Amino acid sequence: MDRQWVVGTPPHIHSDESTARIMWRVVLALAPAGAWSVWWFGPAVLWVIGLSVGVSVAMEALIQRLSGKPVTIADGSAVVTGLLLAYVLPPNGVVPATAGAPAQLTLLPWYVPVTAAAMAIGVAKHCFGGLGQNIWNPALVGRAFAQVCFPDAVTLPMWPAGDFFGGGGQAVTQATALAKHPAAPHIYSLTDLFLGRCGGCIGEVSALLLLIGGIYLILRKYVDWRLVSAYLLTVFLLVMILPAEEGTFWAESPESWMSRQAQARVAPAAAGDAAAAVGRVVARPKLDLAFYHLFAGGVMLGALFMATDMVTSPLTRKGQVIFGIGCGALTALLRFYSGMPEGVCYSILLMNTACPLIDRYTRPRVFGERRK
C-alpha cells in the first residue's frame, strides 16, 4: 500500500485556543476591576475607557488597512491594549484653583487617552510588525508617553470619593497611597487598599478584584504562576529588607500599625501615649509595610496582567522566574529610592528590553547537545 507523507512546518500540536478567545477572556478577567472603578470613581471612568479602547481599535484598523493587511480588530488584542492603558490612567481631570474658586474635578482631557492610545498601537505595537512582534508592552509605553507629555494631567491632587469615604461622590484632596510626604499622612488601611477604597488609577485600586481576575487567567494557563509569584514575593521581601528614609513613608488610618509608627516619628504625642504606640509597633512594622506595598499602586495589575504579556515576557520557565524577580526588584528600588512614588511601569518596560537576553540564556538544551 502506497503511503503519502505530508511535511509541514511546526507547530504540529494544536489546541482549540485562539488569539480571539484568549484576548476576550483577558477582557473578562479585567472587567470586575473596571466595574468597581466605575462605581467608586463615577461615570467619568467610562469616558477614559471609551476613548482609550475606541482609539486603540480605530488605530489598529487604520494601520492594518493602510499597510494592506487583514483587519483583525475582532480578535480583541487592540481592546485589551486600550483597556489596560485606561486602567493605568487617572479617572478624572482637575481644573486648577483660581483666585475666586477652588480646584474642581472634571473629565480627563481627551487628548491624554487619545495620544497615549495612538502611541501604544501605532508606535509600540505596529512599528515592530504588529501583534506578536512588539518588544515592549504597548499599554505601558502609552502610559509612559502620557506621563512625560502630560504630567499635570496624570498626577492629580484630587480624586473622586465613593460612599466609603463618606463623601457621597464628592472630591477629596489627599495623597495617593504611595505618595512620599512626611506632612501628609495617608488615610488608607490595608483593608481599604485590598478592597479598593482609595484613590489611584482606574484599574489598580482593588487588589481583591485584580487577584480574582488573575487567578482565573492562571487557571486557564494564560498566565504563568511562576512569574506572578516571583514578582510579588520579590517586592514583599525587598520591602522587608530595604531601609526606608525616616519619616517619609506610608501612614494608614489612626488605629493601624503604620499610622502609629508615622505619628511616633513625625509628631510624637504625650510620653505615655508615644511609648504605648511604639510598644505596639515595634513587633511587626515591616510586615505591615510589605503588605501595604503589594496592595497599593499598580503591583497587582502589573504582576497579573502587564508583566505576564505573552509577547513581551520570556518563553522558558526559568526565564519567567528571572523576569518576575527583575520586575519586583526594580519596582521596590524605584519606589524607595527614586523621585517617583510608583515603579511598576518602568520596571516592566526595562525587563521587556532584557527579555530576548533572558530567553537566550535560559533556553533548554536539545537532548544530547553539548555545552560549548
Image (cartoon, grey):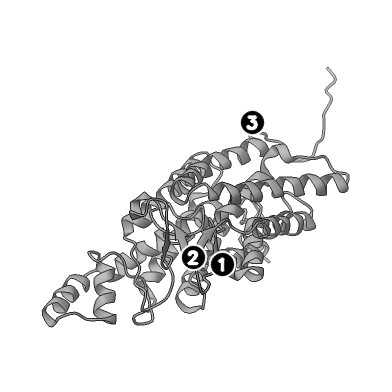
Mark nearer the viewer, 2 or 3: 2
Q: Which mark is residue 16?
A: 3
- Quadrant occupied by the N terminus: top right
- Quadrant occupied by the C terminus: bottom right
In the rendered structure, the answer to whether residue 353 lies left or right of residue 307 reads right
Q: Which residue is mark 2?
A: 328
Location of residue 100 in the rendering, given as x and y in whole percent from the top left corner: 50, 71
Location of residue 150 in the rendering, given as x and y in whole percent from the top left corner: 63, 68
Mark nearer the viewer, 1 or 3: 1
- Between the residue at mark 2 and the residue at mark 3, the CA separation in whole angstroms equals 34 Å
Q: Amino acid at mark 1?
A: Ser
Q: Is residue 117 visible?
A: yes
224 up-or-down from 19: above or below: below
Q: Amino acid at mark 2?
A: Gly
Q: Amino acid at mark 3?
A: Asp
28 up-or-down from 173: above or below: above
In the rendered structure, the answer to whether residue 183 lies left or right of residue 255 reads right
Tell which circle, 2 or 3, labels the residue nearer the N-terminal end: 3
Check disc 3: other Cα within 10 Å, few if <14, some if 14-19, many if 20+.
few
